[in-house]
Amino acid sequence: MLMKIQGDGVGLAAEVRGDPDGPTLVLLHGYPDTRRVWDGIVERLAPRFRVVTYDTRGAGESGRPRDRAAYRFVHLMNDLRAVLDAAGGDGPVHLAGHDWGSIQGWEAVTTMPERFASYTAISGPCLDHVGQWSRNGARPSARLAQALRSWYIGFFQLPLLPELAWRTGLAARIITRADGMPGGGHFGPSLPADGVAGVALYRANMPARLLHPLERSTDVPVQVVIAEGDPFVTPRLAESARPHAADLRFARLPARHWAPVTHPAEVAELVAGHADRV
């Protein structure tokens, strides 16, 4: 069932599929994806779960605010609350996120933990955990290894050039080839607009949280899926969550960054298994 939900000043395109009587599972996509990145997962989990996906602001069929400040965490979390209120059903829901969806998921389970029964994070750490890890716990070699993989974060802070790269198709070619998926078939037709709009996620949130990290911890049971071949997120970075989650487990997957696309059966099994455990 396709729904149009009013978020924090923006319309959100949401979809509810699966068993209407099953436990609710909300899936958050990353950048520059849309909710379609989860289709292979939804297909496998729909017989058991009531699965909710939606295009986050700036992506797919949802609205695209032009103001950079409109992409701050406070607005992203208000959008998620609106989705939970409209489509989340009764009681806490299970949550999973990939890439920027995982970053948002960390913000959600550390600021409104009462809304969630479990959380699975895939290839996206909490920005505040990363900031603290970089300043207090990381070895210089680990920081350097991650910095080399995170080159695009600095690039996205530049004026005009990132937008130009998305509009010309250069950014899509670079990112997909870095992940070994030169076809880029997992991206939708709205990719150029999604890429341009989503740059604001990096500009609005990353400098403040990485340089001045907040305290973010949670009692929600968390599973961190480490894609062992991820060219963007090192295992050391994924493990920065260790001091901040009371119930935390790790699962390793022989995959690259877009594991929900390349390994849907394995990801679905991990998400379902974690939900079953709690």
Image (cartoon, rainbow, N blue to C red):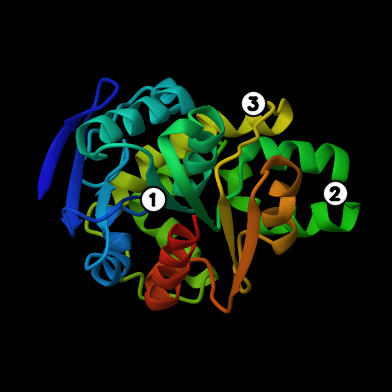
Q: At which x and y percent is residue 166?
A: 39, 50
Towards the viewer: 24 or 215: 24
> Mark 1 or 2 closer to N-term?
2
- CA distance for labels 1 and 2: 33 Å
- The residue mark sitting in front, 2 or 3, is 2
Name the one closer to the observer, 174 or 246: 246
Residue furthest right in the image? 140
Above or below — where is 212 with respect to 157? Answer: above
Amino acid type, residue under disc 1 in the picture: Trp
Number of numbered discs: 3
Q: Position of residue 19 (x, y in %)?
A: 18, 59
Asked if the residues shown at circle 1 and circle 2 are in contact, with their CB atoms under 8 angstroms apart, the answer is no
Camera-side residue of 146 and 19:
19
Q: In which quarter of the image is residue 45?
A: bottom left
Q: Mark 3 points at which residue?
A: 208
- Left or right for 228, reference 185: right
| Residue found 50% across the figure and 61% down from its top | 277
Q: Which one is earlier in the sequence, the residue at label 2 or at label 3?
A: 2
Mark nearest the camera among 1 and 3 is: 3
Query: Residue under circle 2?
Result: 138
- Residue 169 visible (yes or no): yes
In the image, what residue type sits under mark 3?
A: Ala
* Neighbour tally class for label 2: few under 14, some 14-19, many 20 plus, Cα within 10 Å: some
Residue 3 position within the rendered picture, expressed as x and y whole percent measured from the top left: 12, 41
Which structural element holds mark 1?
A: helix
| Residue with the mark numbered 1 | 166
Q: What is the C-alpha distance between the residues marked 1 and 3?
A: 24 Å
- Image point (52%, 70%), residue name: 179
Q: Which amino acid does the dot numbered 2 rest on?
A: Ala
Q: Is mark 3 on a helix, strand or loop?
A: helix
